[in-house]
Amino acid sequence: MRHPRRRLRWSLTVVVAVLAALVSACGSAPAGPPVLTWYINPDDGGQAEIAARCTAASGGRYTIVTSTLPRQASEQRQQLVRRLAANDSSIDIMSIDPPYVPEFAQAGFLAPMPPAIEAAAREDRVPSSIEASTWQGRLVAVPFWANTQLLWYRKSAVAAMGIDMNQPVTWDQLIQAAARARTQFAAQGVRGESLTVWVNALIESGGGSVITNVGETDPALVQLGLTAPPGIEAARILRTFGDAGIAPPGFPTADEDTSSDTFQSGAAAFMVNYPFIWGKATSAVEEGSIPQSVPDDYGWTIYPRTAPDLPSAPPLGGINLGVGAFSAYPDLAYDATTCITRPDNSAYYMVSNGNPSSRLSVYSDPAVLAEFPMAPTIRDSLTQAKPRPQTAYYAEVSGGIQRTFHPPGSVTPGATNEAATALITAVLRKEALL
Amino acid sequence: MSQTLERPTGAVDPSATGGRGDKSKAERRLGWYLAGPAFVVMLLVTAYPIVQAVYDSLFDYRLTDPENSSFVGLGNYGVILTDSVWWIAFGVTAFITVVTVAVELVLGFGLALVMLQALRGLRPVLRTVILIPYAVITVVSAFAWQFAFSVDSGFVNSWFSWVPGVAADTDWFGTQGASLFVICLAEIWKTTPFISLLLLAGLAQVPDVLQEAAKVDGATWWQRLRKVTLPNMKAAIMVAVLFRTLDAFRVFDSVFVMTAGANNTETVSFLAYRQTIERVEIGLGSAVSVLLFLSVVLISALFIKGFKVDLSQARGE
């Protein structure tokens, strides 16, 4: 009789101990300042550092912790949309790729922005990043950093071609020059988001738009401008590019990293790409894998023109900050976005992680100029950049373009535009698969 | 017998069969007790999502716009079945399934024979070596194959430059044929071990007596394989082919990693992914999933009824 009783007493002790531990664990969680979770896109640790700096700057009002999203922008959006559709209250701040901002805003996933925050968020910003954070006339996200593509060239190769790169250049000019010199032109031909970026930039540079009635919320009423003359002209340039024999091997699967490698190796004399390639080349020099003469040979200028008499509309990328509609602390989260996008944090992020700021003043920061000699060109490019089509159905529009314009070298001007319009229209009416 | 005689109610049915009936009833009950919880869990985790998907597939329902969801009946199925995208994906899936299963069956049978006839000391090592590809996660294996064949970082183009048609700048993921070739290769490499293990189990079941008798009668190795080994392991072969076909029909990872559906390499599961996860059109995506489910059910029914596969035989019962 003694043994079972002793065993019972033992198990009771264990149960009480476990319960006590659980209670104390639960009790300790709410103590301390509110924790804001910031869902970030993967980077080189810059956003985590800014989170730590802003936690310190808040003077104990909040703590920011970061949570990393997948690598691809489309996968980041998928995760955020799925969580927000389930009213996830753990999402306080999120790093959103600009084309998805309208979808988030339209679905009610973004907390309304307080007027004081809005005033601060509009200050000192490049216009394209404000445009990309706006939905139906209201600012719904805080511009954080803004990316843009430049036209990169090898000075040594271009010197022999007889093109003046200080003057605006057109796609046709560059394609002819590259074909004559039997060199390559690196661009992103992979069936992915970068293809939409290219097609959109070509159309916007020609004075057209993929969507002509931006802001329309009924998918069946969205008007497409793909078959208008600028759309046809964009398809013609892609086809000329494909037929000229200047596309690098593997062009239909080339993404930004592939293009950067092709350009760095010297196989291509021209490339359209984001400024991260500069950081890639300078770190390759530090590692000793390429000589200093390689980045010294890099030249850069504004994105090529579609029409000779119209300024180009370079692609816009970057990250805007949204505050989750189901966050327990929307005011604190908005407060934190103001700290995250402060000029000093923006400059730090550009210098350390190579991601250009959405703030105009950062481009005159000496530290930024020392690291990025092309900073003034980036600023000018951002000033004339145009965002991708703004619609709550961006995934459908982009997916439709990717399906019909791939492989980009084989598009047929006119027929491809018709096919894209028919596909996207049917998909938006939910009458076709994608 | 003595137990039944001692029973006070023995008058009802004192025969021995009654006792056996009680015993088998008790055994059956014990069987339910043991398998019941697992059965309930299976119902919860498989039947519930299937029913939910069938229900969702009848609606025009977008995850980001739940207020405007509406009942459309079989409309989603109409959209899918009249869309060439579905039929292309279906064809690609069928092609991958037929090619990979056929090649795997031949390779797997060869490997099973090697494993069966290997020296006793070598057998465990051999089995482990053959099983390694199957232990690799599919996504990882897909990336490995993609890196091997990629035009900028791959080694295949330089190693196989002597093969006609392969050059330093061959873009394997640039055309439908070449992409499907690499996808099939990756699938075959990865799942041949699975099929060879199932076939090994079948091979081990072929009685040695029959083999020896045939040998004594002067049958050659080839005759013994065709007349003794294969007929005796028909059930194992059919089960292996059935399992692999069901598996191959749901191919997703390799396509997702290698081409992301470019150049008409989309499969049916990829289509379901794109509608449900990327477009967040839950209704349309569920309908694609239901059609995929029905295809798989159809394949199983064809195999089990058409080829008279007895699943219990594969377990050696």
Image (spheres, rainbow, N blue to C red):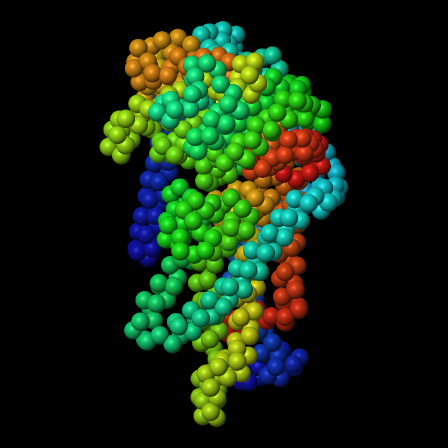
Q: Give percent across and percent down for residue B296.
A: 62, 56
Q: In which quarter of the image is the N terminus of chain B?
A: bottom right
Residue A417 at x, y = what percent?
A: 66, 30
Decide if residue A149 is on the left or right side of residue B31.
Answer: left
* Residue at left offset 44%, top offset 22%: A151
x and y, in percent, of residue A353 in the image: 35, 23
Residue displayed at 54% across by 62% down = B101
Q: Where is residue A118 in the image (x, y as percent from the top left)?
A: 50, 9
Would residue A222 be found to the left or right of residue A375 on screen? Answer: right
Q: Can residue B235 be seen from the camera position used here? A: yes
Please determine whether, in this image, residue A266 is positioned above or below residue A150: below
Residue for point 68% across, 42% down: B57
Q: Nearer the viewer, residue B186 or A370?
A: A370
Quarter of the image for residue A32 reads top left
Q: Does the rendering let one see residue A129?
A: no
Along the viewing direction, whichever of A365 and B279 lies nearer the viewer? A365
The count of marks equals: 0
Left or right for A183, reference B6: left
Q: In this view, does B75 lie above or below B194?
A: above
The image quarter containing residue A289 is: top left
Question: Which of these two is toward me, A323 or A210?
Answer: A210
Can you say whether B267 is above or below A80 in the image? below
- Between B121 and A286, the one lying in front of the other is A286
Q: Residue furthest bottom?
A: B217
Q: Which residue shows up at 35% across the image and 63% down it?
A: B129
